[in-house]
Amino acid sequence: MHRPRRGAAQLNAPRQAWVPRVLNLTLAGFLLLFLVPMVLHLSELSLSVQVFLVVLAIPLGFLCLACLASAIRPGSLGGLVRRRR
């Protein structure tokens, strides 16, 4: 462990770049396990249930896309937020 003159202590361990990729890819796959069957069987349901499921699926779809984007290139979403400011 290294303690600089100012600030908090920092660990000198090497970064493991595969961890955020695997975690985000796993999370995206988990979300797709819910979204794909829901979309495939949407036509069999009544209109009110369809509207409810579409409203539920839109944020889950965006979250799945964000996880896939972060799995492809970790840190890309944080860079996008910094550029937008």
Image (cartoon, grey):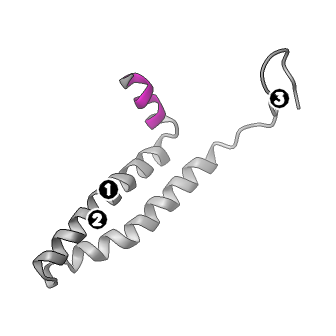
Q: Residues within 10 Å of mark 1 (few under 14, many from 20)?
A: few
**What is the span of residues highlighted in magenta in the rendered image?**
77-83
Where is mark 2, residue-wise? 56
Q: In this view, does 48 lie to the left or right of 66?
A: left
Where is mark 1, residue-wise? 59
The alpha-carbon separation of the residues under discs 2 and 1 comes to: 6 Å
Residue visible at 81% across and 34% down? 11
Is 82 part of what is drawn in magenta? yes
Q: From what the image shows, is residue 75 above or below residue 28?
A: above
Contact flag, marks 2 and 1 (Cβ < 8 Å): yes
Residue visible at 39% across and 22% down? 85
Where is mark 3, residue-wise? 9
Q: From what the image shows, is residue 56 above or below residue 45?
A: above
Question: Picture coordinates of residue 79 (x, y %)?
Answer: 46, 29
Question: Picture coordinates of residue 72 (x, y %)?
Answer: 46, 45
Question: For the residue labelled by badge 2, is the local secondary structure a helix, a strand or a loop?
Answer: helix
Question: Picture coordinates of residue 37 (x, y %)?
Answer: 30, 77
The alpha-carbon separation of the residues under discs 1 and 3 comes to: 38 Å
What kind of residue is marked 1?
Pro
Q: From what the image shows, is residue 56 above or below residue 20?
A: below
Contact flag, marks 1 and 3 (Cβ < 8 Å): no
Going from N to C along the chain, the mark reached first, 1 or 3, is 3
Residue visible at 63% across and 50% down? 19
What kind of residue is marked 3?
Ala
Question: For the residue labelled by badge 1, is the local secondary structure a helix, a strand or a loop?
Answer: helix
Q: Is residue 66 left or right of residue 7?
A: left
